[in-house]
């Protein structure tokens, strides 16, 4: 009975991880801003519009790549978890699949952790230091549209933080998933020392 509950929990966690990582990917893809640059001076007039996406920031591209790899791995693991939850047996029981699960989950967990570190560190650095100093300098030049551009960049970075936090949710769920087999092994032991 306990094994069936743990197998069902594994399936539920795998689906939840997939949803969190897909939400991270979708949020990064739809996170765009359009910034208008308007430099009106006596001797020249420059007006331009640029579109900013995750592709413009290497750290965000890395976070998105990690989320895609993690979602792909989780998508591969879901059928195995469904089979385990429905039958109570592993689909491949020669020892290869449990090792793949164990080591694959560890690799994905470390990838998710590096993605979170890159995304949050970059977002905080940009938001706390770069945006304030750049836009303070632009505001001193009395350029039109500076406040709108700053607000747009702040919304862009905030959405990047939210998307990276979804990656963090996936990591937390992956850590819980890695703890479940040890709970199952502990429940089989009768005494204090096994």
Image: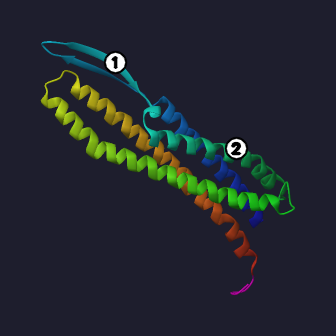
- Element marked by disc 1: strand
Q: Which residue is mark 1?
A: 49
- Which residue is pictured at 77% across the width and 49% down the height? 82
From this view, report whether residue 7 is shown above or below residue 34: below
Where residue 170 sits: x, y (%)?
56, 50
The residue labelled by disc 2 is: 75
63 on left or right of 159:
right
Between residue 116 and residue 6, name the one nearer to us: 116
How packed mark 2 is, by other alpha carbons closer than 10 Å (few <14, some 14-19, many 20 or more), is: some
Badge nearest the viewer, 2 or 1: 1
| Observer-nearest of 30 and 61 | 61
Span highlighted in magenta in the image: 190-194
Task: Give residue 142's position: percent from left, percent from top.
Answer: 13, 25
Q: Nearer the viewer, residue 157 or 60?
A: 60
Residue found at the very far front of the displayed protein: 43
The residue depicted at 70 percent of the width and 75 percent of the height is: 186
**Which residue does the image show at 58% across and 39% down from the upper left?**
22
Work out whether 99 lies above or below 183. Answer: above
Residue 79: % across, % down:
77, 46
For the C terminus, the image quarter is: bottom right
Task: Locate the N terminus by quadrant.
Answer: bottom right
At a point 68% along the width and 70% down the height, the residue shown is 182
Which secondary structure class fits the magenta region best?
loop
Is 180 situated left or right of 52 in this image? right
Please state if 118 lies on the left or on the right of 179 as rendered: left
| Distance Cα–Cα, label 2 vs label 1 | 39 Å
Q: Quadrant of residue 47?
A: top left
């Amino acid at each position: 009975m306990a094994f069936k509950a743990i197998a069902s929990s594994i399936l539920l966690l795998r689906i939840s991880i997939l949803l969190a990582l897909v939400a991270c990917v979708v949020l990064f893809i739809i996170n765009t801003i359009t910034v208008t640059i308007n430099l009106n001076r006596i001797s020249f007039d420059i007006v331009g519009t640029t579109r900013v996406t995750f592709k413009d920031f290497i750290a965000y591209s890395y976070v998105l790549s990690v989320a895609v790899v993690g979602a792909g791995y989780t998508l591969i693991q879901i059928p195995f978890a469904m089979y385990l939850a429905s039958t109570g047996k592993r689909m491949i029981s020669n020892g290869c699949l449990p090792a793949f699960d164990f080591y694959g989950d560890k690799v994905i967990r470390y990838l998710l952790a590096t993605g979170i570190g890159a995304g949050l560190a970059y977002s905080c650095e940009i938001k706390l230091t770069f945006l304030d100093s750049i836009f303070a300098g632009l505001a001193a030049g009395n350029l039109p549209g500076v406040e709108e551009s700053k607000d747009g960049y702040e919304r862009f970075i905030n959405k990047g933080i939210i998307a990276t936090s979804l990656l963090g949710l996936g990591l937390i769920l992956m850590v819980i998933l890695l703890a479940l087999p040890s709970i199952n092994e502990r429940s089989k032991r009768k005494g204090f020392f096994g």
